[in-house]
């Protein structure tokens, strides 16, 4: 006697739920992939933006005060164009350099007072404006051989004083007493216009 067999569904009916499940899974995977298609490049752009912003902007310091012994400014090429520093005695100075890396302007505060000096490309001071310990101003002009050629200053009486130097000597003009004195390089001073008595 044969066992009665349970009727089975046709093969295509058994496979149908499996194909529907696969289609559903495939559709879900496609939706996720489409979402990732824009998510990954978006994340890459978001990560790159701060890097490019940092490269495009100079480094900045946001502080109320900065304390240092020396501070330098450099050009886009990396050359130092300005230097602000303090000497061993703590007195400040500022140096400005030209394209050839030569100091062309110096400003400093010395023990006697402040000064500003203009230098030529050979680093020779050609003009210096200063205040002395009594805050009396002076302007000194020199030639390329570092020799003073003229000095305009306030003398000890508070009047103007002008000295002009040449290769043969100097002319000394004093406002407080009207004196004009010629001082030749190889002789004794001569009062060209004697001071009034």
Image (cartoon, rainbow, N blue to C red):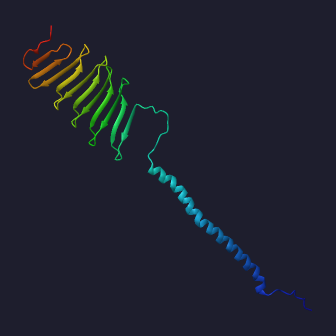
Residue 83 locus on image (x, y percent): 35, 35
**Residue at the far right in the pictured view:** 1
Q: What's the residue at 11%, 15% (across, down)?
A: 193
Looking at the picture, does residue 143 appear above or below residue 153? below
Toward the viewer: 149 or 82? 149
Residue 15 locus on image (x, y percent): 75, 82
Residue 139 locus on image (x, y percent): 24, 25
Q: What's the residue at 33%, 40% (across, down)?
A: 81
Quadrant into which the N terminus falls: bottom right
Toward the viewer: 193 or 56? 193
Res. 34 in view? yes
**Residue at the far left in the pictured view:** 186
Is 73 situated left or right of 46 in this image? left
Toward the viewer: 28 or 115? 115
The answer to which quarter of the image holds residue 167 is: top left
Looking at the picture, does residue 38 appear above or below residue 71? below
**Residue at the far bottom in the pictured view:** 1
Is 181 situated left or right of 72 in this image? left
The answer to which quarter of the image holds residue 19 is: bottom right
């Amino acid at each position: 006697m044969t066992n009665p067999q349970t009727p089975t569904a046709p093969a295509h009916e058994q496979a149908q739920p499996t194909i529907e499940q696969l289609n559903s899974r495939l559709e879900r995977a496609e939706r996720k992939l489409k979402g990732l298609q824009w998510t990954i490049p978006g994340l890459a752009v978001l990560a790159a933006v701060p890097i490019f912003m940092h490269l495009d902007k100079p480094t900045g310091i946001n502080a109320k005060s900065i304390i240092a012994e020396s501070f330098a400014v450099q050009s886009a090429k990396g050359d130092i164009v300005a230097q602000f520093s303090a000497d061993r005695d703590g007195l400040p100075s500022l140096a400005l350099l030209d394209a050839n890396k030569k100091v062309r302007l110096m400003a400093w505060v010395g023990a006697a007072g402040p000064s500003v000096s203009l230098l030529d490309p050979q680093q020779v001071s050609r003009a210096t404006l200063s205040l002395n310990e009594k805050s009396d101003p002076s302007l000194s002009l020199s030639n390329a051989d570092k020799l003073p050629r003229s000095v305009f200053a306030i003398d000890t009486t508070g009047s103007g004083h002008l000295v002009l130097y040449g290769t043969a000597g100097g002319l000394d003009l004093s406002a407080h007493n009207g004196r004009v004195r010629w001082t030749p390089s190889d002789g004794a001073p001569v009062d060209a216009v004697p001071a009034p008595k």
